[in-house]
Amino acid sequence: MNVYFCGSIRGGRGLQPVYAALVSHLEQSGHTVPTAHVAAPNVLSDERRYSSDGIYQRDVLWLEACDAVVAEVTLPSLGVGYEIAYALHKARKPVLCLCQVGTPLSAMIEGNNNPHLRVVFYHDVEQALAAVDQFLDAR
């Protein structure tokens, strides 16, 4: 399956190890993750090589081509929110949002009743990985 992974880049990198675990798990499970770079420790410096227009065009193509979206939404990110909305309403893709327990989540995500959106609060990475497997197995 082609899985678009979203995580905060410019909004903060405090969860980079979680992103890395999620992307690694997806790839080890046989999925293609065109956005695997989001989990890299050096993504901020790597992304500077591209124009904002180039990043937007590339990411929209990837969203259109993916089978599903997995978004880690614990750290607020305008880009991740945009990707989720685009995936749900423009590309019509199923989206899993993962958020650490105890973190206030935007009402625009938590209150969204779109049947293609699933929100899971998790305590640890193992729970998040299990939620990813369950979400993708249902596809």
Image (cartoon, grey):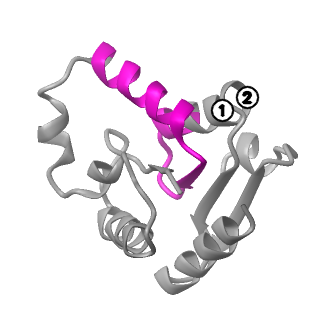
Residue 55: x %, y % from top left: 32, 25
Whether the residues at callouts 1 and 2 have beta carbons within 8 Å, the answer is yes
Query: Looking at numbered disc 2 in the image, what kind of residue is underneath it?
Result: His
Q: Residue at x 41, y 74 (%)?
A: 25
Mark pair 1, 2: CA separation: 6 Å
Helix, strand or loop at label 2? It is helix
Residue 135: x %, y % from top left: 68, 67
- Residue 103 visible here: no
Q: Is residue 50 left or right of residue 97?
A: left
Q: Is residue 68 left or right of residue 92?
A: left
50 w.r.t. 130: above or below: above
Foreground residue among 89 and 100: 89
Q: Is residue 99 left or right of residue 44?
A: right
Quadrant in which residue 70 is drawn: bottom right
Q: Residues within 10 Å of mark 1 (few under 14, many from 20)?
A: some
Q: Residue at x 68, y 41 (%)?
A: 93
Magenta residue span: 53-81
Q: Residue at x 54, y 53 (%)?
A: 71
Quadrant in which residue 15 is drawn: bottom left
Residue 36: x %, y % from top left: 32, 53
**In this figure, what is the number of numbered marks?**
2
45 w.r.t. 19: above or below: above
Query: Looking at numbered disc 1 in the image, what kind of residue is underneath it?
Result: Ala
73 w.r.t. 122: above or below: above
Helix, strand or loop at label 1? It is helix
**Mark 1 sits on what residue?**
85
Disc on res. 89: 2
Q: Is residue 72 magenta?
A: yes
Q: Residues within 10 Å of mark 2 (few under 14, many from 20)?
A: few
Residue 26: x %, y % from top left: 44, 68
Q: Is residue 137 magenta?
A: no
Camera-nearest label, 1 or 2? 2
